[in-house]
Amino acid sequence: MSASKISVVVVSGSLERMQMAAMVASVGAVSGQEVIVFLSMNALPYFVKGNTSKAPHEGDMGKLMATKKVPEFKTLFEQAVELGDAKIYPCSMAMDILAVEQENLEGYLQKATGLTKFLHDAQDGQVWTF
Amino acid sequence: MSEKKIVDGRGSFCPGPLMELIVALKSSQVGDELEVLSTDKGSADDIPEWINKVGHEYISTTEAEGVWHITLRKSK
């Protein structure tokens, strides 16, 4: 059972990394795997309501992706929740630093969690870090 | 009688067509046949994998003029 659980840690704010994280989370979740996601560091600001800034690309792939009809990473994370019951947790430390409250974050996110709880939840599965 | 539903994922990249299929499956009945249209080769490879993994009935994949047609039956 444990091998079918996927924990995704997203710390980067780059387009390519957040896209790949969203793909792993959404495809995993809709394939019947339990998925939990932890959003921290440079990734979290993109999940503050009203933030419309575009994530910067790291390389040519991200540049090219922006010109094609690729599903947006936020849409994929939302679909991971809506279609696959993934649970996405904002990091409480990153929220403190950004000075944002739960109601400032996208509604499909779970309540803020700290590392202790996330590490506990992630201990019996695969951990993917982006 | 169950009807064949067309899921038009043309123009979208992985995993867009798969997500569109899953949305369509939610509103389908067991026994319904669905056909996904995709211009993305990656999705044409990946969607049959998903169908088999999740346990629906995979019927066929055909390609015509750059469009892949992936057919399945909802079985649960």
Image (tube, rainbow, N blue to C red):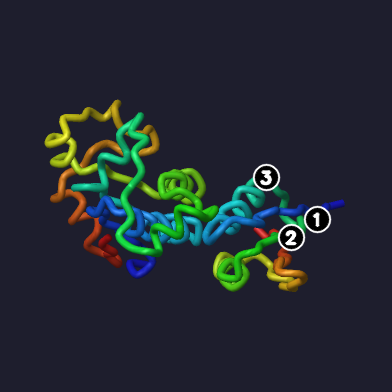
Look at the image and tell me whether residue B35 can be seen.
Answer: yes
Q: Which quadrant is the N terminus of chain A positioned in?
A: bottom left
Secondary structure under badge 2? strand
Q: Amino acid at mark 3?
A: Ser
Neighbourhood count class around disc 3 (C-alpha, 10 Å): few under 14, some 14–19, many 20 upward: few
Q: Amino acid at mark 1?
A: Lys
> Disc 2 marks which residue?
B35
Look at the image and tell me whether residue B52 can be seen.
Answer: no
Against A96, residue A31 (above or below) is below
Q: Please name whichever residue, A13 or B50, is drawn nearer the observer in this view of the structure.
A: A13
Secondary structure under badge 3? loop
Q: CA distance from mark 3 to mark 1?
A: 13 Å
* Residue in the picture at 22% in, 47% down: A42
Quarter location, residue A7: bottom left
Against A24, residue A115 (above or below) is above
Q: CA distance from mark 2 to mark 1?
A: 7 Å
Q: Please name whichever residue, B37 or A62, is drawn nearer the observer in this view of the structure.
A: A62
Residue A20, image x, y percentages: 38, 60
Residue A66, image x, y percentages: 45, 53
Residue B9, image x, y percentages: 65, 55
Neighbourhood count class around disc 2 (C-alpha, 10 Å): few under 14, some 14–19, many 20 upward: many
* A71 relative position to A14: left or right: right
* Residue in the picture at 29% in, 54% down: A14
* Residue in the picture at 21% in, 42% down: A113
Quarter location, residue A49: top left
> Disc 3 marks which residue?
B27
Q: Are the two marked residues, 2 and 1, in contact with CB atoms closer than 8 angstroms? A: yes
Q: Amino acid at mark 2?
A: Glu
> Disc 1 marks which residue?
B4
* A29 relative position to B57: left or right: left
Q: Which quadrant is the C terminus of chain A positioned in?
A: bottom left
